[in-house]
Image (spheres, rainbow, N blue to C red):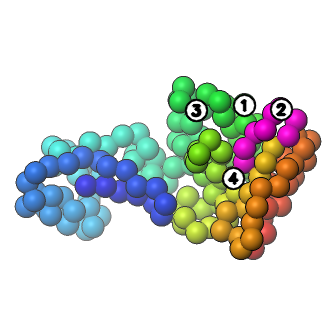
């Protein structure tokens, strides 16, 4: 069984009992609160992000997760820089192939997005995702925040 937002899916448990799985999916689709779903169906294993999603707080939870994961250590400086900006911290972050992806709407995988990769402390590469003909653009460190704000604001 898995849940997700467009572009992001993750497993929340599994069972070999097809009937039990069907019951769990039906309960979930009927809107049972996730903590009740987990209590009622023992095979369901929810993590903190699922709770944040249900509370309507997936973005802040995702920032915290990325900034605390040793796996993402290489991106920590960039993540901290992006999160420090009052506009960019409201964007949903993920990491894709080593680049930080910021998405305007966490619930819509087709919403405006950018990929940001740190070349070095003074230069970044940025790409607008989903824009025809988009390619990597080099952006100096001093212009990065303004460039990202503009790119994420364009229709």
Question: Which tag, 4 or 2, sits closer to the chain's start?
Answer: 4
Mark 1 to mark 3: distance in Å? Answer: 10 Å
Numbered circle sitting on residue 77:
1
Secondary structure at badge 3 equals helix
User: How far from the left and from the top, in percent, is residue 148?
Assistant: 79, 54
Which residue matches tag 4?
Answer: 115
Q: Is residue 148 visible?
A: yes
Magenta-highlighted stretch: main secondary structure?
Answer: strand
Question: Which tag, 4 or 3, sits closer to the chain's start?
Answer: 3
User: How far from the left and from the top, in percent, is residue 17?
Assistant: 8, 54
Mark 2 to mark 1: distance in Å? Answer: 9 Å
Give the camera-side residue of 108 and 131.
131
Verify CB contact (< 8 Å) between mark 2 and mark 1: yes
Q: Quadrant of the C terminus?
A: bottom right
Mark 4 to mark 1: distance in Å? Answer: 15 Å
Please count the marks in the image: 4
Q: Could you tell me which residue is drawn at 64 percent across and 51 percent down?
A: 101
Secondary structure at badge 1 equals helix
Which residue matches tag 3?
Answer: 72
Q: Could you tell me which residue is drawn at 83 percent across and 61 percent down?
A: 150
Q: Could you tell me which residue is drawn at 76 percent across and 61 percent down?
A: 135
Q: Could you tell me which residue is drawn at 60 percent across and 52 percent down?
A: 92
Q: Nearer the viewer, mark 2 or mark 1?
A: 2
Mark 4 to mark 2: distance in Å? Answer: 17 Å
């Amino acid at each position: 069984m898995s849940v997700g937002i467009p572009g992001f899916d993750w497993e929340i448990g599994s069972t070999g009992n097809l009937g039990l799985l069907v019951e769990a999916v039906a309960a979930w689709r009927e809107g049972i609160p996730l903590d009740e779903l987990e209590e009622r169906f023992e095979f369901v294993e929810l993590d903190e992000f699922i709770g944040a999603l249900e509370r309507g707080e997936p973005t802040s939870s995702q920032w915290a997760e990325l900034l605390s994961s040793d796996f993402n250590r290489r991106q920590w400086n960039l993540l901290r820089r992006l999160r420090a900006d009052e506009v960019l911290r409201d964007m949903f972050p993920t990491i894709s192939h080593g680049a930080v992806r910021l998405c305007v709407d966490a619930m819509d995988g087709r919403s405006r997005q950018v990929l940001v990769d740190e070349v070095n402390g003074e230069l970044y590469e940025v790409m607008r995702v989903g824009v025809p003909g988009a390619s990597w653009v080099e952006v100096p460190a001093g212009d990065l925040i303004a460039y990202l704000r503009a790119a994420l604001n364009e229709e």
